[in-house]
Structure formats: C-alpha cells, structure tokens
C-alpha cells in the first residue's frame, strides 16, 4: 500500500504547540483550546477568524518556526504503519526546513520516498495539483489526513481517504493508529 500523508496533526501532534503560540500572540485573551479548534480547520482560517494583524502574523510565524521537535511528537503507532507501507510520501504546507527538522529528529525521514512542502511551489490544498503529481509518480492508494482539507484533493483523484481523529466523510476513520490495519481494508 502506497500512502500519501499530511504532516501536521496527522503524523505529528503539532497543533497543541501551535495553539499555545497563537494564544500567546493573542495576549492570552483567547484560550489554547479555542485556538486549537480554529487551527484544526486551517491556519489561514484561524488567522482570519481571530483577525490577526500583520505584526501578529509575523510574530506567530516566528514563534512557530522556533518550536522544538520535542513539542511535536509523532502520534503513537504511526511508525508501525510507516514501516509496513509499500511507499510513503508527504504533502504539507509546512516549509522544508521545518518539516525536516522534526522528521530528522524522530528518525522518520527514512520512511518517505518524497516530501512535498510549501517550498515546492504547488498551490495550497484543496487544489489537487500536488496530490496528482505524487499519485502519478508513486501510484498512491490512500491519502491520510486530519482535516477534510487534506482529503478533498484525494477524493478528486478517486483515491481512498482516511481521516485521523475527524469524523467528516471519508472512506476510513481512525482515532488511534494502533487500529490502522483493522480499519483500513480495501475491498
């Protein structure tokens, strides 16, 4: 099975650290839980929802880039899936430096045949261009993400979809990766 993975909130538990920084930028007037909820839709959505100024956006981006990998651990059991998959690829809006910083720290880089980041110039999700590129090159069977935004491009290409910790419409749903091979079964 060849799997296309989202990065934030799918492979690595990054949103608590992001929510903490957004709450900090907002002067603590918005809880980390409320920031988390809006960030799970998308960072662009959260920035708009909380009406961050340009200087707040700059501060937030600076804080995000300085988060240590220890604050962004991989989800339990995800490495078991990476080891068993035929091929793994990533499509993320994260910049290359930030993505590799965490992947390298946890020794995950070796599991991926290709990592497409914001630096590669593809349009942002839900545009399917990056997914089409990865599918054409790696014959993707399944796209895994934590937000509906992550699977819309896969659906457009006719790929199987799996949402992690999200019950929006998808072919498969997981709350914990330990159940992956019980839940994700192709007919």
Image: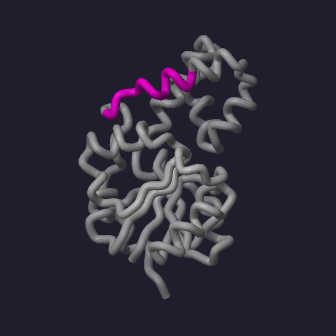
Residue depicted at x 45% and y 57%: 90
Q: Give the quadrant of residue 155.
A: bottom right
The x, y position of residue 146, in whole percent, is: 53, 53
Mostly what secondary structure, the magenta segment?
A: helix
Between 37 and 105, the one nearer to me in the picture: 105
Residue 165 is at least partly visible in this image: no
92 to the left or right of 112: right
Is residue 66 a member of the stretch shown in magenta?
A: yes
Residue depicted at x 32% and y 65%: 81
105 to the left or right of 16: left
Quadrant in which the N terminus appears: bottom left
Residue depicted at x 33% and y 71%: 85
Give the magenta-colored segment's residue range. 60-69
The x, y position of residue 32, in whole percent, is: 55, 26
Instruction: State the count of labels.
Output: 0
The x, y position of residue 102, in whole percent, is: 34, 40
Is residue 49 a member of the stretch shown in magenta?
A: no
Q: Is residue 50 above or below residue 10?
A: above
Outermost residue, bottom direction? Answer: 187
Between 115 and 85, the one nearer to me in the picture: 115
21 to the left or right of 154: left
Outermost residue, top direction? Answer: 27
The x, y position of residue 17, in whole percent, is: 45, 30
Residue depicted at x 32% and y 63%: 82
């Amino acid at each position: 099975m060849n799997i296309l993975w989202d990065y934030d909130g799918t492979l690595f538990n990054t949103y608590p650290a992001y929510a903490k920084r957004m709450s900090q930028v907002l002067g603590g007037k918005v809880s980390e839980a409320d920031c988390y909820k809006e960030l799970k839709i998308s960072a662009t959505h959260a920035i708009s929802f909380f009406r961050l100024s340009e200087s707040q956006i700059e501060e937030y981006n600076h804080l995000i880039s300085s988060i240590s990998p220890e604050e962004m651990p991989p989800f339990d059991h995800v490495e078991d899936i990476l080891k068993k998959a035929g091929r793994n690829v990533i499509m993320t809006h994260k910049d290359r430096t930030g993505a590799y910083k965490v992947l390298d720290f946890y020794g995950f880089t070796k599991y991926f045949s290709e990592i497409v980041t914001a630096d590669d110039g593809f349009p942002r999700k839900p545009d399917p261009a990056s997914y089409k590129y990865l599918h054409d090159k790696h014959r993707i069977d399944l796209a895994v993400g934590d937000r509906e935004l992550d699977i819309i491009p896969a659906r457009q290409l006719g790929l199987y979809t799996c949402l992690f910790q999200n019950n929006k419409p998808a072919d498969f749903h997981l709350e914990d990766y330990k159940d992956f091979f019980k839940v994700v079964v192709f007919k």
